[in-house]
């Protein structure tokens, strides 16, 4: 049996640490922001749609009546968690503009927000 010197052991441990930090090749892909997001106004409602994100298990919508809503790491607005696509928000005020971003969720990891969209219910 060959004796392992400290230098070889250090290289082995460092390599293992690098693999562990890289996710050990577990195949996890961070979620991407939804694309193709649209907001369509109706009578006291807005319907939000987007292109599905591969592997997403849920979607979050962040909304506000002020421009600049950015999702989970900025001006949050009000979150609507685990929503379906399309999603219709009802009970809104006619003539008020509502601003939205959508995020996708994979393995409890939330994506960056989509491009913002807005609509003004009638």
Image (cartoon, grey):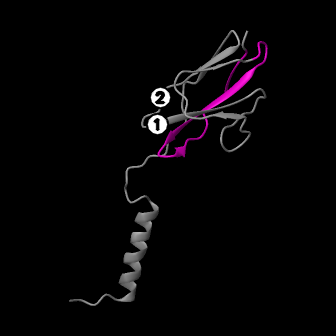
Image: 101 above or below 121: below
Which of the image's four quarters has the C terminus?
top right
Q: In the rendered image, which quarter is residue 114 located in?
A: top right
- Whether residue 115 is visible to the viewer of this picture, yes or no, is no
Residue at horizontal 24 percent and vertical 89 percent from the top: 2
**Residue 72 has which mark?**
none
Question: At numbered mark 2, what does the secondary structure look like: helix, strand or loop?
Answer: loop
In magenta stretch: residue 69: no
- Residues 73 and 35: in front is 73
Residue farthest left in this picture:
1
Residue at 53%, 46% (x, y): give it. 109
Reply above or below: 85 against 107. above
* Mark 2 Cα shell of 10 Å, populated few (<14), some (14-19), many (≥20): some
* Residue 47 coordinates in the image, percent (x, y): 61, 18
- Looking at the rendered image, the quarter that the N terminus falls into is bottom left
Disc 2 to disc 1: CB gap under 8 Å: yes
Whether residue 53 is visible, yes or no, is yes
Residue count near mark 1 (Cα–Cα under 10 Å), binned few <14, some 14–19, many ≥20: many
Identify whether 48 is placed above or below 22. Answer: above
Q: Residue at x 46, y 63 (%)?
A: 21
Residue 50 appears left or right of 75: left
Q: Residue at x 47, y 33 (%)?
A: 53
Question: What x and y, as percent, mark residue 7?
Answer: 39, 85
Q: What is the span of residues highlighted in magenta in the rendered image?
A: 93-120
> Within the image, what quadrant is residue 9 found in?
bottom left
Q: CA distance from mark 2 to mark 1?
A: 8 Å
Coordinates of residue 57 in the picture (x, y in percent): 46, 37
Query: Which residue position is annotated with label 2?
Result: 52
Left or right of 60? Residue 13 is left
Tell me the SS state at disc 1: loop
Which residue matches tag 1? Answer: 56
């Amino acid at each position: 049996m060959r004796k392992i010197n400290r230098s070889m052991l250090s290289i082995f441990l460092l390599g293992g640490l690098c693999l562990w930090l890289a996710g050990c090749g577990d195949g996890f892909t961070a979620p991407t922001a939804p694309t193709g997001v649209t907001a369509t106004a109706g009578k006291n409602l807005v319907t939000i749609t987007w292109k599905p994100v591969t592997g997403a298990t849920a979607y979050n919508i962040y909304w506000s009546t002020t421009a600049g809503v950015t999702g989970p790491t900025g001006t949050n607005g009000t979150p609507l968690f685990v929503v379906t696509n399309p999603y219709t928000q009802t009970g809104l005020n006619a003539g008020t503009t509502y601003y939205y971003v959508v995020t996708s969720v994979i393995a409890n990891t939330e994506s960056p927000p989509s491009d913002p969209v807005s609509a003004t219910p009638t």
